Image: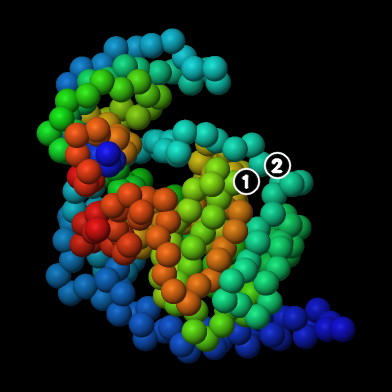
Amino acid sequence: MSTPEDKEARIVDARMRLRQRFEARQAATPALSDTAPMGTGQPNRHGMPRLPPGQHEVTNWPVLDLGQKPVVSKDVWRLELFGACAHPQVLDWSALMALPIVEDTSDFHCVTTWSRYDMRWRGVRFSDLAALAGVHDDAEHVLCHAYDHYTTNLPLVEALKDDVLIAFEVDGAPLPREHGGPARMITPQLYAWKGAKWISKIEFRVDDRPGFWEERGYSNRAHPWREDRYS
Amino acid sequence: MAAQRALRLVSSEPLEPDADGVPQVRAVLELGCGCVVTRSMAADRVQVTVQGATLVVGKFPCREHSTPS
């Protein structure tokens, strides 16, 4: 039987191996490496123009979903990690809260052409969940599932970035239901549809599989500074 | 039928709030594919940007066009 110390050591080891495997490729992704990115405004923290091309800054937060807003209390909320990983498991709310919790302020870029700046998030890094699950060495893709049956896919190299969170607080308050509460994923370096609201499952995959909008003509990559909205 | 973005709000009128009390509007939109459609939606889908422009957010299906825009 493994002790908590064994588990922590295993997660640290897995995190280091993920970092080694993806560090160079991550630095080469468009949101970090484009030398002539499109957009306007002062550089963001990664050197990209603050407002990606075709976007409009707003100060409120529009609500977009598939037409239903599931009611998921923290008592019944579960997050399943499965697929190409050594330790598939189901986390409840207390298990999520037991993981390292981080705060980060990032911009939010919706493919429907609005951007909101400086959103203060609190949550758990996706990379810590990937380390906990022990993602297989041949896994390259992620498919996220949500309580409203929404799905979205993204490359593992993007999902492992430090600002990709399973977020449960925003601007100092619990994440509201209409914005995906109790927990949603955020992907600040991609269009926001890549971050599932009401997230319920994270599937690690060797092969890629398109999600809801990706099957309907939206981009598999979703790079805001390349205005990469449609496939 | 694919989702389109709204290029322009042609007109809008308020409707009764929905069952959750969320204010609604009926909006006439010019979509990215060029079609003009009428849709009912939450009033906060009509946004005013920091620059003062009106923006209708969302993905709006169009029966006439099969690729998104």
Count numbered badges in the picture. 2
Tell me, for residue A46, which label it has, or none.
none
Q: A91 and B34: which one is in front?
A: B34
Give the vertical position of B40 relative to B54 (above or below).
Answer: above
> Residue drawn at (41%, 69%), measured in percent from left and top?
A208
Residue at mark 2: chain: A
Percent x, y for residue A68?
A: 52, 34
Residue at image coords 29%, 12%: B13
Secondary structure under tag 2 reads: loop
Question: Which residue appears at 35% of the width and 20% of the height?
Answer: B40
Q: Choose between B61 and A47: the one closer to the eye.
A: B61
Q: Quadrant of residue A37?
A: bottom left
Q: Residue at position x 21%, y 47% from top?
A: B67
Q: Are marks 1 and 2 in contact (CB under 8 Å)?
A: yes
Mark seen at residue A73: 2
Q: Using a 10 Å C-alpha cutoff, classify the residue at mark 2 as few (fewer than 14 neighbours), some (14 to 19) or many (20 or more).
A: few
Relative side of A35 to A157, left or right: left
Q: Nearer the viewer, residue A39 or A113?
A: A113
The location of residue A93, given as percent across then percent down, is 72, 55
The quadrant of the image that shows the N terminus of chain A is: bottom right
Outermost residue, right side: A1
Indicate left or right for A120 with A201 as reference.
left
Type of residue at label 2? Ser
Q: Position of residue A226 (x, y in %)?
A: 21, 62
Report the coloring of the rendering: rainbow
Report whether residue A128 is seen. Answer: no
What residue does disc 1 label? A182
Q: What secondary structure is marked by label 1? A: loop
- The quarter of the image holding the C terminus of chain A is bottom left
> What kind of residue is marked 1?
Pro
In the rendered view, does A27 fall on the left or right side of A160? Answer: left
Q: Given the image, what chain letter belongs to the residue carrying mark 1?
A: A
